[in-house]
Structures are given as structure tokens and as C-alpha cells.
Image: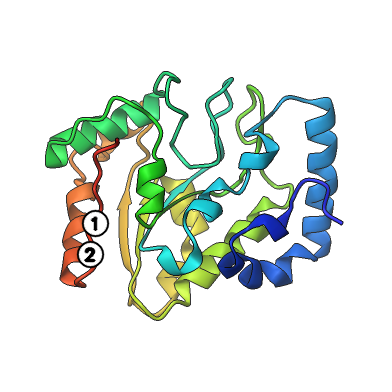
Amino acid sequence: MNVVLDFDKLDYSWQERLEVVRGSPTVRRLDDFLASEYENRQVFPKREDIFSALSLTPFDKVQVVILGQDPYHGEGQAHGLSFSVPDGVPLPASLVNIFRELEADIGVVNTKGCLQSWATQGVLLLNSVLTVRKGLPRSHAGKGWEVVTDAIISELVNREDRLIFVLWGSDARKKCNILFQAPQRHAILCAPHPSPLSAYRGFFGSSPFSKINYLLRKQNKPMINWKLP
């Protein structure tokens, strides 16, 4: 029985699509690793928030995928959605830059950092790795999460309708190599990562939010309301 990774609490649409990986030796080793980490280290997000992205955005509701690297590694920041922080938590630098581009792109000004309303509208805010040790970015990379998130992406790529994949940075593009080999029914928006190290290399001015809504409108799908409540 899983100690940390409780797939049974996922929305059923995700449960059935992750059935193959949940019992794999890699995921069993990942679960053992996470059990030790949560017992002996400070790990983010909280156990109950690990699968928040999947819980808030069921498989059939996904319209847009925004892929991150791994959770924020600072105290109180990560809560299971890529680039998002709970309300009341100061905005990390990457999110500041995302909001700066949002305002420049479509004039929307957000001051709170919780992106949950985006998730409930069909924006899957997925990290490649879903946990991290405090203060150590990428500390849980290579432990097995990649098998789980690869399966998630593969299932989405195989959807018949057209989705929009937003790949910010080289890690996201590498993660989604499968997209570039799949039938070209999906839209792919690529730009540098919004971190201060790379945002000026082409993230600013990339206009992802207006492009996403343009593509959704062309498919007669509801556009995303990017203004946070």
C-alpha cells in the first residue's frame, strides 16, 4: 500500500490513466523514498497537496498545460500547482515576471499568487517533479517522479481534441519531446523560463495569455479568465 502517494484520492479520470505506473517498481521506490523524506526532512508541498494539480483539473477538463520544473523550495510557498503560491505568501520572482507579462499582454493585474482559479478553468499547472526538499531545488529529481509526469503528459498528448501546451524554459521543452513527435493536433507555445535569469531573453514579449485565448476561441472553447479573484 502506498505510504505517501495515494492515487486512490485522485479524480477517477486520472486514477484509471495512471493505473499502469502506480504499481511499477519505480513508483514503489519513489513512495519509499518520499516516506523517508517526509519523516526525516522538511519537504514541500504538504503530503495532501502533492496531487493538487490533478485534483483541481480532471483529465477531461484540461485545455491548457503549463509545465514547471519542481515545486518552490521556500517555506510555505509550494501547494501543488506549478508557479502558484497560497494567498498571503509573497510572490516568488518567477511569478512576479509571469504577472508582469500578463499585464503587458492583456492588461490584467494580479497581486495575489494563488492560481487555483486558473486550474479550475482547465489550466493544468503541472511540475515535472512534484516534491522537493526545503532549500534544495531539484533534490527530488531522478527519484521516479518523471515516470509519473511522463505518463500524465502522454495521456494528454493522446487526447483527440486539441490542447495547448505552454513550455517555458529548456527543461519543459525536453520534458515534452513527445509532443514534437506526436501528430500536430496540439498547439505548443515555447518561451524562455520566467525566472529573473532568463525572462529578458524572450519570455517578456512572448504574449502567452492572449495567444492561449485566441487558440481557445478558434476552437469555440471558453477562454481563460486570467484575473484572479
Query: Please, what is the three-letter code of the amino acid marked with disc 1?
Result: Ile
- The residue depicted at 64 percent of the width and 55 percent of the height is 146
Pick the quarter of the image with the C terminus: top left
What kind of element bears circle 1? helix
- Percent x, y for residue 174? 49, 55
Query: Please, what is the three-letter code of the amino acid marked with disc 2?
Result: Leu
- The residue depicted at 55 percent of the width and 35 percent of the height is 79
Of residues 28 and 109, the one drawn nearer to the viewer in this rendering = 109
Of residues 142 and 134, the one drawn nearer to the viewer in this rendering = 134
Mark 2 burial class by Cα count in 10 Å: few <14, some 14-19, many 20+ = some
What kind of element bears circle 2? helix
- Percent x, y for residue 162? 33, 73
**Residue 142 visible:** yes
In the image, residue 96 sits, relative to residue 81, either above or below, namely: above
- Percent x, y for residue 103? 17, 34
Name the side, left or right, on which 4 lies relative to 223.
right
In the image, residue 16 sits, relative to residue 192, either above or below, namely: below
Q: Which residue is mark 1?
A: 212
- The residue depicted at 35 percent of the width and 47 percent of the height is 118
- The residue depicted at 67 percent of the width and 56 percent of the height is 9
Q: Which residue is mark 2?
A: 216
* Contact, mark 2 vs mark 1 (Cβ under 8 Å): yes
